[in-house]
Amino acid sequence: MSEATVSRVLNGKPGVAATTRQSVLAALDVLGYERPVRLRQRSEGLVGLITPELENPIFPALAQVIGQALTRQGYTPVLATQTPGGSTEDELTEMLVDRGVAGIIYVSGLHADTTADMQRYERLRAQGVPFVLVDGFSPKVQAPFISPDDRAAMTLAVTHLASLGHTRIGLALGPKRFVPVQRKIEGFVRAIQDQLNLPTNVIETELIQHSLYTLEGGQAAATALIDRNCTAVVCASDMMALGAIRAARQRGLEVPRDISVVGFDDSPLIAFTDPPLTTVRKPVPAMGQAAVRTLLEEIGGTPAPHSEFVFMPELVVRGSTASGPGNRNHS
C-alpha cells in the first residue's frame, strides 16, 4: 500500500475502503506497533485483578475464570501479580488507579492478613474506585467479599479421614495471621472434637503445624506431624499436599498405605499426581463469576450488600487417602 493510504488510516481520515483500513490495522498489530489511541477498540474499560503469585496453579485458574467473565462483559482484564521483592499490593493498586481502571478485584490480598492496615481499602473507596475482595475477610472493610467455606472444608476432610479409621489427623497450613488459616483451624478443631473427642489443647499443640504455603512448607509441616505419629495429614493447599507426600517418601512411608494426605483447592493437574490427590475442591468458577458480577454491580452503581458471599467446597476422593494403619482387614 502507498504511504499516503497508510497515513490516511493512521490519522483517521476518510477515503479509505473498510477492508483496506482493516488490513493496515492488522499489519500494525502483527508488526507490534501500537495503534493510535483513537483507533483502539473501545472497551467498557479496564478492570484490575491483583493476585499474590502465579506459582500456585489455583491463582492462574481463578485469574482465567475472572478474565473470561470480564471479557464477556466487554471489559479488559489487567492482571497484576505481586512477586517477592517486586511490586507491593499498594504499588499495584496505585498503578491501576493511575491507568483509570473501572474497578479492582483482589485475590488473597492484604485484606486476608489480620495484621495489615485496612485503611488502604477505605482510601480506595474514598477515591471512588469499586472493588471486590476474594479469599479473606475483614469487618473493617466496607466491600463485598467472596470466600470458600474454610470451616466446612475442614469438616469434609476430617470426617472423610475419621471414617477411614484415622485417629491421629494432622493439619498443615500457612501463617496464623491469615483469615483463611484461622477459619481452617476453627473448622479443624471442631471437626476433630466431634469425630474423635480429643481435648482442644492436644489438638492445638500436637495436631496443627504452621508453615509456608509452598511445596517445601508442606514438606516441613508434614515431617513434624509424622514425627508426632499422625497417620493422616490435611493440607491447606494442594502445593503443601505435594510437599507432604514428599515428606512421607523421605521417611520411607507409602501414600496412602502408611499415611493419607488430603489437599485443598483441587488445582489444575492435581488429579494426575502420583498418587492422584484426594482434595477439597474450591469452587473456583462460581467464585470467579460471583466476583465479576458483584464488581460490575458496584461499577454500575447498584452496590451489592457489604457482606460476604460464602461458597461451599466439595470433597474429591482420589488415591491419596486410605484406611488408617491398624484398621485394615488382614485377610
Image (spheres, grey):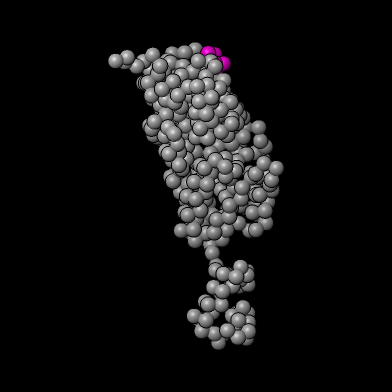
Name the residue furthest left: 331
Task: Let me know if residue 180 appears in the view.
Answer: no
Residue 227 vertical placement versus 288 (above, below): above
- Which image quarter holds the C terminus? top left
What residue is at 43 percent from the left and 45 percent from the top? 286
Where's the N terminus, which quadrant? bottom right
Q: Is residue 203 above or below residue 98?
A: above
Q: Nearer the viewer, residue 30 or 237?
A: 30
Frontmost residue, 266 versus 14: 266
Judged from this view, the residue extending furthest toward the front is: 252
Give the image location of residue 327, x and y in percent.
Answer: 36, 15
Mark yes or no: residue 212 visible. Answer: yes
Q: Is residue 68 magenta?
A: no
Q: Position of residue 75 (x, y in %)?
A: 52, 59
Q: Which residues are magenta?
A: 201-206
Which residue is painted at 56% across and 16% down in the image?
205
210 to the left or right of 278: right
Where in the figure is residue 64, as x and y percent of width and height? 49, 50
113 or 254, which lies in front? 254
Residue at 42% across, 38% down? 271
Left or right: residue 325 versus residue 134 is left
Relative image position of residue 157 (x, y in whole percent): 43, 27
- Compared to residue 46, the image places residue 196 above or below, namely above
